[in-house]
Structures are given as structure tokens and as C-alpha cells.
Amino acid sequence: MRVDKWLWSVRLYKTRNQASHDCSTGKVKRSGKTLKPSAALKIGDTLEVPSSDNAYKRNIEVIQLIKKRVGAPLAREAYHDHTPAKILAEAEHRRLANKENRQSRKEGDQGRLTKRNRRQWEEGGNRFF
């Protein structure tokens, strides 16, 4: 079974193209060696796969080969995640901090000013800063 197809079918990637791209750029590894998207995958292989936000590497053991994309509960049965709990806890903490930061931003403080906000700023109505 192809690596890119398996990564997509167990829902570690949203699209097969993304899985193929990460394999091609050397982000997916088996035993420290990079894999091509077409590399053969066997039960018992251990893969290093980047997280969705590329903040850490996940250690995934292949338990079952799935050819078609399945639902999340069935997909979780196809692999075992050996990523240390400490790394997962740090990633969760970082995710929650980013969520709080996004929610605490003021209205109009999300980056570049809109045309209307820029005009108000230039007129002296500094209500955004």
C-alpha cells in the first residue's frame, strides 16, 4: 500500500495531495529515512509524521492497512500513536493559548485596516488603537 494513500485514508491529512507533498519534501520518515509517496507500507512500520500545525512530530505505528478513507473511529483503529504525552500536552497548551489570543483581540485589531477604519484613523477618530 502507498504511504500517501494510507496517510490520507486514516485521516492524518485532509487531502491525498497534502500527504504526497509532505512525503516528497521529506517530512514523513520511516526509521529516520525519508519516504517517497509511492513507498510500500507494511503492518508494523513506525512513521514520523508532522502534526497538522508542523509544531511537533507524531510517532505512528501502522496496525491496519486501509485502502479507502473511512470514518474517524475506524481510522483511529488503523494506527497507534506513540507520541510522548509530554509533547502532546505542550501542543494542547499551545493550541489553547492561540485560541485565547484569537478570542481576546479587539474588533478592528485583526491586521490591516479596512478602508473605512483607515479613514477614521486619518480623521483623528483613534478608536482602534
Image (cartoon, grey):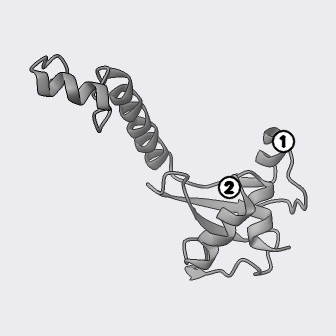
C-alpha separation, residue under disc 2 versus residue under disc 1: 13 Å
Q: Which residue is mark 1?
A: 71
Expressed as whole percent of the image width and height from the top left, the position of residue 30 reads 63, 76
Q: Amino acid at mark 1?
A: Gly
Residue 45 or residue 99, whichever sits in front: 99
Q: Amino acid at mark 2?
A: Tyr
Expressed as whole percent of the image width and height from the top left, the position of residue 55 reads 43, 54
Q: Residues within 10 Å of mark 2 (few under 14, many from 20)?
A: many
Expressed as whole percent of the image width and height from the top left, the position of residue 6 reads 79, 64
Q: Secondary structure at mark 2?
A: loop
Q: Is residue 80 above or below residue 127?
A: below
Q: Is residue 33 left or right of residue 61?
A: left
Q: Residue at x 40, y 43 (%)?
A: 90
Residue 50 or residue 78, whichever sits in front: 50
Q: Which residue is mark 2?
A: 13
Q: Disc 2 or 1, which lies upstream in sequence?
A: 2
* Residue 101 position by quadrant: top left
Residue sitting at the far left: 124
Q: Residue at x 75, y 81 (%)?
A: 39
